[in-house]
Image: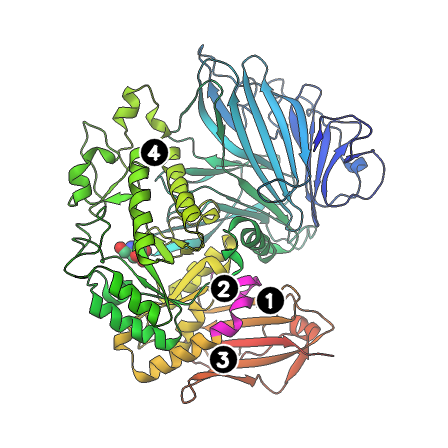
Amino acid sequence: MVQNNHSEDQAKVDKATSISLSSGIHTHAVHTSWALITEQSTYALGVTNEGYILNLHWGPRLLTLDDLPVPLLPPDRSSQDLLANAREEYPGAGGLHYGETAAKVLFADGVRDLDLRYQRFEVEEADACDGLPVLTLFLRDTVYPLLVTLRYQVDTVNDLIIRSATFTNEGSDTIRLERVFSAVWHLPSQYTPRILTTLAGQWSEETRIQRRPITAGTALVESRRGITSLQAAPWFAIEPEHNPFTPAGQHEVYFGALAWSGNWAIRVTGDVNGTTVIAGGISDHDFVWQLGADESFATPDFIAGFAFDGLNGARQRLHRYTRKIVLPQPQAHQPRPVLYNSWEATFFDVHESGQVALAERAARLGVELFVVDDGWFAGRNNDRAGLGDWYADPHKFPQGLGPLVKHVNALGMQFGLWVEPEMVNPDSNLYRAHPDWVYFFPTRPRSLARNQLVLNLGREDVRTYLFETLNRLITQHAIAFLKWDMNRPISEPGWSEYLESGGEAREIWVRHARGVYTLMDALRAHHQDLTIESCSSGGGRADLGILRRTDQVWASDNTHPEARLLIQEGFSLELPARVMESWVTDAGRGEIPLAFRFHVAMLGALGIGGNLLHWSAEELDEAAGWIAAYKTIRPIIQEGDQCWLLSPHATGGALAAVQYTTDDQDEAVVFAFQRSRVFGEPLLPLRLQNLQANARYSIENVTVSLKLNEAKNSAVGPAQSLSGAALMARGLTLPLEHRHAYASCLLKIRRLLP
Ligand code: DGJ
């Protein structure tokens, strides 16, 4: 580890020479500044004489430390705005900080200004958790005993900087934290206007792509619901407005995502000078944290990156980081199994014989994991009762879950179960025993949503109860997979006992999210092979924080293939295919060919959610064929780089095409979808990406032969093979029938040996 600065013999301290910089963290020998170099980008920061830390550059890679500007405050133009354009890395609210701020505190004597100045730094070659290089900067308030450490982890391969901050109270008086964002990011100022892309939605309509120009003022995306939310995803991308007269940097994208599953905020602020500042982290709405003597508060990670190759480049970088660093290991590199889920087939009408019948059909199709959804536990015949009583309903499962689990395992499938641990119905034994375990204000009615209330996971007794209950369930029944649902936001965020004991009830939003993390971490520590799916009325808790302890997410309750394509395109901007559980259900049955429905679901981790007892022999045969085909290409989808070649968002849902490519570019698969071509207009060639220009590739159209009950491959069009250059420059004619509504295809592209 390198500490402090200005010492000649420190391993990684570079002389201010013209030596071309390698990837990693470099420290300037003269100025107190650093360059965080990744394969394609540089993030540089430095300390002014006054002790402010300024961003010096973020964007395309610089070659030498000489290229860094000297860290200086900009000239004061108006005598009142000294720090407004200062590009401060972590501005505290107070003094002349009128722009975006990262932190706001209240000291015990009533002083509300925070004045943070640089103290020292440390560089780690590889941190203990993720094995990435880290720069840590230490700042202190000029008067009060408050230490703030800023952490910059560098994913050199994926051009990402992962930032967080830790506040430590080194004194004896409590300090009230009122805003503790993870990071403030400064984009280079530029004349070309910029476009902000975000993801918004609602139930059954998650991750819809939103695009708007950045102008003077602040765009705010956030959640105040106690969960990540269906309404907005903690992700952004910013690119220049396309303009052929200013071509430089046309496809440069800045993008980022927050690793947090509670209230969050991302603020994107522009001004009349062409600056763009992004600030974000835990939402400061209804947030206060009392930091007692010697206590620390660590923010979640805010991951951001620079891509020179557009939104596809941005998505691929985040995906690789998620697969390699974020997801629980070693599961992250095992294939996600094809699962069956009972929800849409039976809803609450769950009972042993019905589930056995479904399981038998599912096994014949090649399903590997059978999941019983909501409706299996005591008193759960509808959504009005039962949540909290996590034992099998004696009428539905007279001998408990044991016989069903055995049957499922004997059929060669793993067993999975739906739970909603954070919830309780007033009509449950748990609530009758512990009405004080939920969030509530004594003087207000407790607002029901979906007839349920939220358990206070800030309470240790609640967490202990939930751990013991879930641990028992998993152990008793060899449960391999939990679908962990969360179907309503938090309301009446009160916690009287905590308040009475001198606590600050506004901490609950953070304590709840941390409580969920703690519980999941403890269960995973006890059950190494357990996998968890994060669900929240669909994709309401899909983020890089929950994905540190869950293996996949349920992206949406909307399983209609047309809607799903749009939802999945948005989802894929933030999260990779292997975490996106996607089922073929009965939505669209009779209207949309089974092949189309399968192709849409095969874009992620494939599952089946239809009522198989209603499917014809032909449908079952075809389904088995597609499942077999999926298994052969699963590594390419689940581990490969994803590229949306035709955006359904851009085509109004009429056309879509997605390519997945292996790291070595030897293999790729392409899915293409056509809702309709109402005028019979010609289908244009589809240009692929990410191939080796000089290599030749075979192109096969994968279809399913019903008689053989297996996938069949045939060459596409007259050409058996094409060079990578031709596939990328001229493109491929898609085998989609003229005027055919809901036509789709799956193409396998394989490099031929020379
Ligand atoms: C919401 C989920 O998104 C659904 O898939 C299903 O699990 C229901 N909850 C069950 O109540």
Q: CA distance from mark 1 to mark 4?
A: 43 Å
Q: Is residue 589 positioned above or below 490 on the image?
A: below
Q: Which mark is residue 280?
A: none
Which residue is labeled 4 in the image?
458
Q: Earlier in the sequence, mark 3 or mark 1?
A: 1
Q: Amino acid at mark 1?
A: Thr
In the image, residue 404 sits, relative to residue 521, either above or below, namely: below
SS category of the residue bearing label 3: loop
At x 45% / y 13%, what residue is drawn? 173
Label 2 element class = loop
Residue at label 2?
335
Q: Earlier in the sequence, mark 2 or mark 1?
A: 2
Query: Going by the image, does 732 lie left or right of 47?
Result: left
Local crowd size for mark 4, using a 10 Å CA cut-off: few (<14), some (14–19), many (≥20): many
Q: Nearer the viewer, mark 4 or mark 3?
A: 4
Query: What kind of residue is marked 4?
Result: Gly
Q: Could you tell me how far apart the alpha carbons at marks 4 and 2 are, in whole angstroms?
A: 35 Å
Query: Which numbered circle lies on residue 661?
Result: 1
